Image (cartoon, helix red, strand yellow):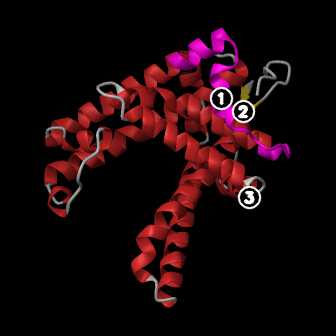
């Protein structure tokens, strides 16, 4: 396995591949994404440690969606069991993935802790536990500062873990090395990732504007909220389908090194 440097325009290709692959198996990939969300939501409601558990499961669940994308790309119908791929690949890989999940949870909590210094923890509490988000809260300078700090610190955390689950699973790399290779690959391909992010923002925004416009023309503007939520979830499922391609193209994979475990 070696790092592969791709041109910035590859970011657009990743978005296109994510969308086109999703439509190869829309029911399966859409259903798996909803299951992914349900598992994390159920985990988060467990008293005391629920939110931490949901965070710790995120790398493994993301890997499951990447495997599902690979199956769809190969013309297979991804079954629900792919979401548990990380826990069916042997003891060593399972322990490594659990460690990666624990590291992600700690990292995320540190980000939320940093944001709490600006608003006394209101943003962190809303994000981790939930609650009512009203106009008065959003207009508080402290809350706004905490939100910006949280988002600013989450970006490098996200890149640090972006490729890590796939590297641990398919290449058997230790969690710490996987984090190093992940952030290095993202940094060296920063142009492609920037275009990738901007393109997804453009896609989400365009779809939202078109959907609202169509509903308004049909006299169904009041139903926009009910329509936008499932539409946003479907778009998010396409986004997760595209993650596999960012990993595939960021490395030159030696077939002799990659485990056949799917």
Depth-wise, is mark 3 or mark 1 nearer the camera?
Answer: 3
On the image, numbered disc 2 is attached to which residue?
A: 251
User: Does the magenta-highlighted stretch encompass residue 86?
Assistant: yes
Q: Which residue matches tag 1? A: 166
Tell me the quarter of the image containing the C terminus: top right
Residue 9 in the figure: left or right of residue 118: right
Count the marks. Answer: 3
Q: Judge whether residue 109 is colored magenta.
A: no
Disc 1 or 2, which lies upstream in sequence?
A: 1
Mark in front: 2 vs 3: 3
Q: Is residue 83 visible?
A: yes
Tell me the number on the disc at residue 249. none
Is residue 191 found left or right of 258 in the rendered image? left
At 26% from the left edge and 39% from the top edge, which residue is drawn?
A: 124
Res 23 label: 3
Asked which quadrant contains residue 36, the reply is top right
The structure residue drawn at horizontal position 14% and vertical position 55%, both measured from the top left corner, is 140
Please tell me whether mark 1 or mark 2 is closer to you in this view.
Answer: 1
């Amino acid at each position: 396995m070696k790092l592969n440097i791709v041109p910035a325009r590859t970011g657009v290709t990743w978005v296109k591949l994510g969308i086109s692959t999703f439509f190869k198996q829309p029911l399966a990939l859409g259903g798996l994404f909803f299951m992914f969300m349900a598992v994390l939501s159920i985990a988060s409601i467990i008293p005391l440690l629920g939110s931490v558990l949901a965070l710790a499961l995120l790398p493994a669940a993301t890997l499951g969606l990447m495997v599902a994308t690979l199956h769809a790309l190969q013309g297979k119908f991804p079954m629900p069991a792919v979401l548990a791929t990380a826990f069916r690949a042997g003891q060593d890989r399972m322990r490594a993935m659990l460690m990666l999940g624990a590291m992600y949870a700690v990292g995320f909590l540190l980000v939320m802790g940093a944001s709490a210094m600006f608003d006394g923890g209101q943003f962190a509490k809303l994000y981790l536990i939930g609650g009512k988000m009203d106009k008065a809260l959003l207009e508080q300078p402290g809350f706004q500062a905490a939100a910006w700090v949280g988002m600013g610190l989450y970006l490098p955390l996200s890149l640090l873990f972006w490729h890590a689950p796939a590297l641990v699973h398919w290449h058997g790399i230790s969690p710490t090395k996987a984090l190093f290779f992940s952030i290095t690959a993202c940094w060296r391909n920063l142009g492609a990732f920037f275009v990738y992010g901007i393109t997804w923002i453009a896609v989400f925004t365009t779809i939202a504007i078109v959907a609202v416009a169509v509903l308004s023309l049909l006299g169904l503007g009041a139903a926009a909220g009910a329509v936008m939520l499932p539409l946003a979830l479907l778009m998010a499922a396409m986004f997760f389908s595209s993650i596999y391609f960012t990993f595939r193209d960021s490395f030159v994979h030696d077939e002799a090194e990659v485990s056949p475990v799917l």
